[in-house]
Image: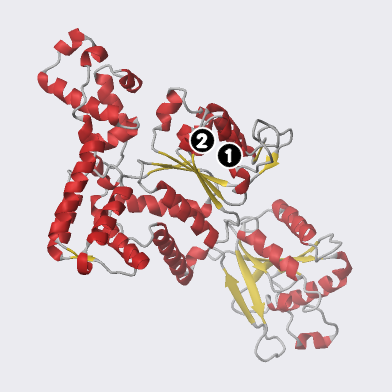
Amino acid sequence: MKKPIVVIGFLGTQLDAGQGAGRWNKWRPTVSLAQHEDMVVSRMELLYTLRHKALAEVVKADIATVSPETTVNLVSLDLEDPWDFGEVYTRLYDWARAYPFDTEREQYWTHITTGTHVAQICMFLLSESRVVPGVLAQTSPPKKQREGEAGKCTLIDLDLSRYDVIARRFDAEQRDAVAFLKSGIATRNARFNALIEEIERVAVRSRAPILLVGPTGAGKSFLARRMFELKQARHQMTGPFVEVNCATLRGDGAASTLFGHKKGSFTGAASDRPGLLRTANQGALFLDEIGELGPDEQAMLLKAIEEKRFFPVGADKEVESDFQLIAGTNRDLRSDVAEGRFREDLFARINLWTYDLPGLAQRPEDIEPNVDHLLAIHAAENHRVVRFNAEARAAYLRFAQSGEAIWSGNFRDLSASVTRLATLADGGRIPVALVEAEIARLRWLWKRGGPAAAVSGDVDLNALLGEERVASLDLFDRLQLEAVLRVCRQARSLSDAGRQLFQASREQRSVVNDADRLRKYLAKHGIEWGRLAEA
């Protein structure tokens, strides 16, 4: 059964006006709503101001003439200035909140043809926010006016998902935004692609802090800047992108760099300094390696995030700055919180949106499109196109995607490798001999600096477990534990060690928590992560 129609609208002091029999020869929007033969308005809530009460009574009587089935309720609004946005919106909002809407039994149309432009805007906003439920009704006159001609009534549903053409535009815009975040690189790793798609939605819909976790060179800084540029293109940010590596901040200068200082606040403070937080006002602040901040700076940052104001060093008066924080870290901040190195309240504040960026070794299928992208960049910067020959390309990708290629420096390693190949290529072609030399160089690099170097380090199990417990271990378990501990001692964090140790099996798991898997393995042998540094 079709629900009764209830129309809510303003009296049109000009369009609805008219006296005598001649008024039926003109189109009056409010009256026309009751003249449509194919629809019956059950009730009309007709809003008017006190000085137009006489006209409201005439319109009510005329509607009763053309549509006896329609009940018209005259609603007087006490408006001093119908062109004052704040006053009109407040009066309408209060009326709507008190009105007994019953969407289960009635359908509501908000008539936006009549009333001042301010009133129409307010009615639109109240409908969009669902304070007034239902659809918008837009009426228009007939092409040729005749007595009793109703004209046209168009319904507009503000649920944009109902419009296929709009939905397609939204989908296209989202695809463009995702491609922008990936710099147009057609990445193939399903987990990474899903992660970027969610980051795109969060980037354009939220100003809450975002935490990017991942190994050095995984692209945290690059992604943070692209997120800012995406918001800037959507006119969501007018301020700058400010970036700082917290590992470079030391001592008294750390607070001064971030929060600024007053002249004379300490030795060498020859003038006022605004600080990076104030510089980032209305923009984005990227704090890379946020886990390196000292306890005082952590406390000051928490206040700045929550209250948008803080004290510069040596100042008695607070300053304000409204910025979005994007933080990066290659450490497991959960462990740092548990061990007291990072404030729990600050971690809770920046942990609303946390994304763990996988390293290049965990995305072998993305190496090929990234190689092509890097070659395209080299060509644009050097005005010289360089390509692999078929055999060389196959040899390079075979090695780059193998377990032997650990990519400890992630995309920095890959970028450097491609740059070397493109620079040394004669005639714009990269041959097999050049690829073989580059592979040898990478093996040498990773043997010195990667996990392979850790294998040569000794692990004193007796110091960790005690001689009696070590003696009870099978040789298999002992060798396995020693190998795991060597990787752990070379890793930057528990998560970093887990990523290296479970680099293959993690791709087959729907929920990835390498740190927890490693923590449980160590706990089985009675070893805590914090004790490894002492071994």
Quadrant that contains the C terminus:
top left
What residue is drawn where x is 27% and y is 49%? 363
Indicate left or right for 508 with 278 as reference.
Answer: left
| Quadrant hosting residue 173 | bottom left
Q: Secondary structure at mark 2?
A: loop
What residue is drawn where x is 82% and y is 75%? 58
Local crowd size for mark 2, using a 10 Å CA cut-off: few (<14), some (14–19), many (≥20): some
Mark 2, residue position: 249
143 or 504, nearer to the observer: 504
431 or 363, nearer to the observer: 431
Q: Is residue 417 above or below residue 474?
A: below
Q: Kindly report which numbered mark, 2 or 1, lies closer to the viewer in this rendering.
A: 2
Mark 1, residue position: 258
Q: Amino acid at mark 2?
A: Leu
Q: Is residue 252 above or below residue 154?
A: above
| Quadrant hosting residue 421 | bottom left
